[in-house]
Structures are given as C-alpha cells and as structure tokens.
Image (tube, rainbow, N blue to C red):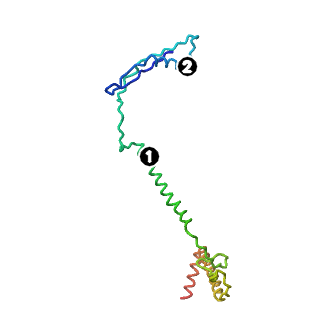
Amino acid sequence: MAVLVDGVYVPDENNELVYQPRTPDELERIAVLVRSAVGFDQTRGDTVEVVNLRFAEAPHTTLTEPTPDLFAFDRGDLMRFIELGVLLLVALLLTLFAVRPLVKRIITVDEPQQPQLIGADGQPIPGTVLIEDSASEEGEKAEEEPRIGWLEEAQAAGAIQVATVAKVGEIIDEYPHEAVSIVRGWLNEAA
C-alpha cells in the first residue's frame, strides 16, 4: 500500500505561509496508523510506503487575525434580529390578549347577580330586578313585610304582556307578508 501525504504550511517572518515537508517521525506515525487501519500482515508480504509530496501551491492567505467589526451585520445576524422581533411581537400580543384579560378577571370582584322576574314561559324577563327585603342593622334578617298586592299583580301583568309581545314578534318574523296585510287592513278600517 502506498500513501502520499502533503507537508505543512507554516508562517515565516513576513507572516506568509511557506511549505515545509513532514519529518521522518511524522511519516512513521502515519505508517503505523495505516498499518493498523488496513490489517497489515507481514507474513503475507504486505508493505506500507508513506511518502511526503507537495499536493498544491500554498494557500494565499496570511495568518493575521481579523479585527472584529461590531457594526458589520451579515445575513445570519439579520435573520436572528428578525426572529427576536417576531418573538417579541408574539409575546406582546399574548400578554395583551391572553394574560391581561385573565389577570383582570382574577382581580375584579364579581357582583352578585340580581334575581329577575320570571315570565309566563318560565324564562327571566330582561331588564327586570326583584327587590329583596333589607336586613336590620344587627345583621339579622328583618321579618318579611307583607308585599303590596297591586305591585305583585302589576309585575305579573307586565310579565305576561312582555311574553305576549315576544310571541307576536316571533309570529311576525315567521309570517312577515301576512303581518303586513293585517296591519294594512287595520289602517284601512281606521280611515
């Protein structure tokens, strides 16, 4: 087996790279490495030759350390800034639309819901509130005073009227043409 290895390039006093052949010790270490890699057996007649040969011209670079330019941005830097900007925007939106409402909900005190009047159909009537009996100064519940009968009757009549108006509205929504003809008939009778 024959192995060719290139020499090394070392800087001279002018800081230019100069070709230098490998030493016999380095060539022997490479030969030992090759023998172990290929399964060298001298009884079979195997031989390993390691020869130093210059492969190409020396690189035309000098070994000066580049001075870092803090304000020179390449494409990778710009992409990183864009990624950070997008992450910042997502965090800001998440804070405004998710975290802030949750914190507000936790901090605000819920007011107890006022009981409403129940209509004839069993549904609460919007915009109505039942008035509760007030408690005495000692914190004990005062004895219930008898309610005024006419107030309860008026509330019940109002609830029935609201339910009736809602039902009429549903019928008008279902049959708009017939409703228009009925209203026209009423207007013609009144005239």
Q: From the viewer's perspective, is residue 152 above or below residue 7?
A: below
Is 168 in front, or is 148? 148
For label 1, the crowd category at 10 Å Cα-Cα, with few meaning under 14, some 14 to 19 and many 20 or more, is few
Residue 133, image x and y in percent? 64, 83
Cα gap from disc 2 to disc 1, whole angstroms? 47 Å
Above or below, 138 relative to 91:
below
Q: Which mark is residue 27?
A: none
**Quadrant of the rendered structure where residue 144 is?**
bottom right
Between 162 and 63, the one nearer to me in the picture? 63
| Camera-nearest label, 2 or 1 | 2
Observer-nearest residue: 174 or 33?
A: 33
Kind of residue at badge 1: Arg
First in residue order: circle 2 vs circle 1: 2
Residue 115 in percent (x, y) is at: 63, 77
In the picture, measured across the screen, residue 41 lies left or right of residue 20, that is: right
Callouts 2 and 1 close, C-beta under 8 Å: no
Residue 67 percent location from the top left of the image? 35, 38
Q: Secondary structure at mark 2?
A: helix
Circle 2 residues within 10 Å: few <14, some 14–19, many ≥20: few
Q: Residue at x 40, y 43 (%)?
A: 75
- Give me the residue at 55% from left, 85% from top: 188
Find numbered disc 1 in the image and state the secondary structure of the residue it sits on: helix
Q: Which residue is mark 1?
A: 80
Q: Outermost residue toward the front?
A: 138
Spot occupied by residue 105 in the image (x, y as percentages of width and height)? 56, 65
- Three-letter code for the amino acid on which mark 2 is drawn: Ser
The residue drawn where x is 54% and y is 17% is 35
**Numbered label attached to residue 36:** 2
Question: How many numbered callouts?
Answer: 2
